[in-house]
Image: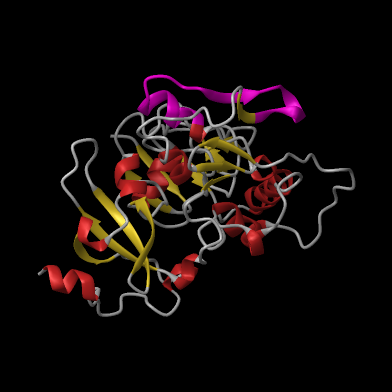
Amino acid sequence: MPKVTIDDITIDVPAGTTILEAARMIGENVPPAMCYYSKLKGSGGKCRVCLVKVTKGSEKDPRPMPKLVASCRTAVMDGMEVKNVTSPEVIEARKGVVEFLLVNHPLDCPVCDQAGECHLQDLSYEHGAAKSRYEFKRRTFETRDIGDKIKLHMNRCILCYRCTQVADQLTDQRVHGVLGRGEVSEISTYIETAIDNEFSGNMIDVCPVGALTDKTFRFKSRVWFTKPVYAHRNCTKCTGKVTLWYQGEEVLRVTSRKDQWGESEAFICNECRYDKKATSDWKIEGPAHVDRHSVISQNHYELPFELPVTQKKLQ
């Protein structure tokens, strides 16, 4: 098995493992990822926030790579040595990439439903500059309904292509994609509200920013005022394992369960996501584990869980 060293931590990994995947195996100083999604084939290589410095190519060829490389696309070679957070060059490059991502993306976190669970919000806090050097007019788009329950805010889109890959790999026919080239590129459909399939809601879950939002949850509450709870049901279309987001005894939204990297553990169907918002529809498992560094953990991180009154009556 190839041996790789990342920030002075050495690990053996299976052949074909990328640097990003190896860093996730270590679990420390993991490069950020806005476009890479381990469950979507072909993802990665677009946002460039996962850049790292390879100081030693391999045991056979110890020369360093001349440029910073995208860790999500670069496979590990035996004896490779990588610097991530220990390289000032990487930190400076990541700061520059974030600045590019924010050229058109407005920092409208106070009015965005994604606030509190937005990866770009975290990146801008960790690597962003206090002021933007961009002095030209930003591109703007009107909000659009691309599905009966999906709202598109193209102003916020960073063109990570995750939503198109979800449509390609989970549905029979994709009806949306990238229109235009260069600075006029945009995610869109030729016909409004054209997206209508059983797994379209997963586009919302994989979106790393607030470009795709759930119309049934819009402006209802901040995520840190809600309580995430694991639940499941017998579903013939998907695994039926979800996260219910409670405010009091009301289920405000249903999402797929997320792992520590913010990726869905399993994609869920629209019936579970939109049509089953009563506690009686689900078997409650307990409180969802929330990283203590997340704003969602505010006031209820790993607190003793008590079933809602309606669920107690069912038992």
Residue at point 50%, 35% (across, down): 162
Q: Return the residue nearer the eye: 181 or 8.
A: 181
Residue at point 59%, 29% (across, down): 192
Q: Is residue 152 above or below residue 304?
A: above
Q: Return the residue nearer the eye: 234 or 4.
A: 234
Q: Is residue 173 magenta?
A: yes
Tell me, yes or no, if residue 44 can be seen here.
no
Q: Is residue 150 above or below residue 112?
A: above
Quarter the N terminus occupies: top left
**In the image: residue 170, left or right of residue 191:** left
**In the image: residue 279, left or right of residue 73:** left
Quarter the C terminus occupies: bottom left
Find residue 197 and report its image quarter: top left
Q: Residue furthest left?
A: 315
Q: Which residues are magenta?
A: 164-186
Q: Position of residue 32 (x, y in %)?
A: 52, 49
Tell me, yes or no, if residue 189 can be seen here.
yes
Q: Residue furthest top?
A: 173
Q: Position of residue 142 (x, y in %)?
A: 72, 40
Q: Is residue 214 magenta?
A: no
Q: Position of residue 196 (x, y in %)?
A: 44, 30
Residue at point 75%, 59% (across, down): 129
Find residue 311 and report its image quarter: bottom left
**In the image: residue 99, left or right of residue 206:** right
Q: Position of residue 116 (x, y in %)?
A: 53, 63
Question: How is the protein colored in the picture?
Answer: secondary structure
Residue at point 46%, 28% (across, down): 165
How many marks the image carries: the answer is 0
